Every structure is written in structure tokens, then in C-alpha cells.
Image (cartoon, helix red, strand yellow):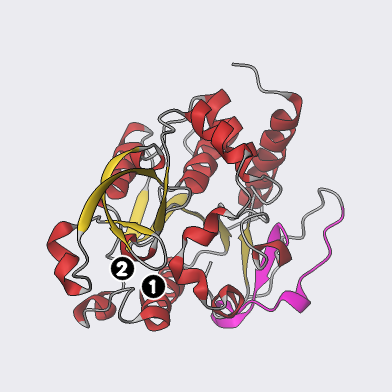
Amino acid sequence: MRLPGYLANLEAEAIHILRDGVSNAEDPVLLFSAGKDSTVLAHLALRAFYPSSPPLTLLHVDSTWEFPELLDFRDQFVSENNLNLKAVSNEEGRSLGLNPVDHGAKYTSVMRTDALKQALDDGGYDVIFGGARRDEEVTRAKERIVSVREKHHVWEPRHQRPELWSNYNWARSDDQTLRAFPLSNWTEIDLWNYILHRRITLAPLYYARERPVLETDNGLIVVGEPGRLDNFSNLPVRMKMVRFRTLGCWPVTCAVESHAHSTLEIAAEVLGQQTSERQGRVSDAGSLESQKRNGYF
């Protein structure tokens, strides 16, 4: 299916950023959570370097509270596209039994931020591609397309460089790394229209079906692993027709009631949304900027 002009422009911009970044990197890496944004970004990388395989590793930081369906999709996607995946977890945090409900900010810091920083240091990666978009959340909007991280992966928004047109500054010192966001100028509806036109397969959690949910004060929590439910909740489990706009750790990611079973139906549904998809992330209730300054992606 031929892309509309605006989607073709967004695709071309993202491919340019990927090629430009890889050509200026010694050890590039693409963060791959298997969510919709990183799946689209991985597809763009496949297009950018076709017929060769993308010359960069896919890195997944597994929080240990991921949806099993998401991990299954991740492994299938990597296998089908013959990609190199490195999955990492913070084993110290796992041994402490941290979970996102009881340990909140500490869990995010240890299992996501610290795990990411350690993996980046261990891999020696200098240019790190991610699927964040500026429309997701106000803190994301402060990011440049090429965002400088100081020693220990610290982000200081006031120290970011100007970006004039499509001239990206890939220069860095020995103790700096660069995080690059090829989807920065995309919106949620752009993403779904692109998925529709390019017929991209996503994790099934994005499509509506009956799922076991807990009705909490924060919203509808889909029970990702029933065997771990006793750890933090005694609420009754009910079946509801739901899907996800965003995916994170299953105990703190809210689903939305929906009957959208296809990409076309979801695109139509998204047009009527008045809130950011990240409002479904209970873990974002604190300061996302504070987390990002400490190294969170």
C-alpha cells in the first residue's frame, strides 16, 4: 500500500536519522521493548539497511514483570527477522523480590534505569536509538532528536544542542553517549496509520479481546501472570473487553475498554482520544523528568 505524503516524509526522516546515526557510531544499539513504538522503529531499521541486516543490536531491558505475551512476540519478531537481541535484567533487584506495586520508584530505578545503564556500559554503546515520541508526555517534548547524555547517562535538558533542520550533531566526548529518537516528530495517530499502511504486526495486547482484569482506583489492570497475583492484590478478577494504548510492567499499566479488533478500528478510535497514551502508565505518576535526568530512557 502506497504511503500518504506525510507518512512518506516521516518514514524518510526516520530512516535518515537511523543511517546518519549508525554511520557516526562505533557501537550503536536499538532499544526494543516489543511495544508498538519500538516495533515500528525496528521495522524502519530493517528498511533503512535492506537488503543487509541492520548493523546494530536490539537491547531489551526485561523488568521481570513483563507481559508473557509481549515476550513471546519479542522472540518471534527477532527470529522471523534474523535480528540480534540482547535481553538483560537486574539480577540483584530480582533477588530482592522488587515489584512495581510495593516498591514504586525504587523498583523503576533499580529494574529499569539501573539495568539500562549497566547494559549500556557493559556493551560500550555510544549511540542508543529509542522509539520515544514528543507527543507522549511533556518531558519527552524537551528532548532533541539527538540527545546528549553526560557521564553516568545523566540528562540535563538545558545543555542540549540546537538542531537546525535535519543537521544532527553526533559529536560526543569520551564520557558522553547519545540517545537518538527517530520517531520524535510522529504522533500516536501517525504511528497507527503507518502500522496500517505498512501492515506491521504488533503484540496482540494492542488489540481488544476479553481479558482478566482488576478494577483498581487507577484503572483496569490486566492480570498478566495469575500465579503472581497474590503478591499484591486480593481484588476480584473480572473479564472485560480491553486493549492497551501503551505497555509497561503489567501490574502498573492500565488497559482501556475497547472493541477495536483491527488496526483500522484502533486508528479510528485514537482519533477520538483526548488524553496521552502514557496516562495508562501508573508508574509515571511521579516525575518522569526526574527519572530521565538519572538515566531512564
Residue at disc 1, secondary structure:
helix
Quadrant of the image occupied by residue 290: bottom right
Q: Position of residue 266 (x, y in %)?
A: 51, 34
Amino acid, disc 2: Ser
Amino acid, disc 1: Ala
Instruction: Give the Cα separation between the discs numbered 2 and 1.
Output: 6 Å
Q: Nearer the viewer, residue 33 or 285?
A: 285
Say whether residue 130 is magenta: no
- The magenta segment is 144-164
Residue at disc 2, secondary structure:
loop
Look at mark 1 in the image and give the residue it sits on: 115
**Residue plotted at (60% across, 31% down):** 193
**Residue plotted at (54% across, 53% down):** 277
Residue pushed farthest left? 227
Does residue 277 appear anywhere in the picture?
A: yes
Q: How many discs mark residues in the rendered view?
A: 2
Compared with 46, 29 (above or below) is below
Look at mark 2 in the image and give the residue it sits on: 89
Residue pushed farthest right? 164
Q: Position of residue 108 (x, y in %)?
A: 41, 75
Q: Position of residue 186 (x, y in %)?
A: 67, 45
Q: Position of residue 250 (x, y in %)?
A: 32, 60
**Residue plotted at (22% across, 74% down):** 232
Say whether residue 147 is magenta: yes
Q: Is residue 206 left or right of residue 40?
A: left
Number of residues whose C-alpha sits closer than 10 Å to that of mark 2, classed few (under 14), some (14–19) or many (20 or more): many
Name the disc covering residue 86, or none: none
The answer to whether the residue labelled 2 contacts the one labelled 1, judged by CB atoms less than 8 Å apart, is yes
Compared with 238, 253 (above or below) is below
Does residue 49 appear anywhere in the picture?
A: no
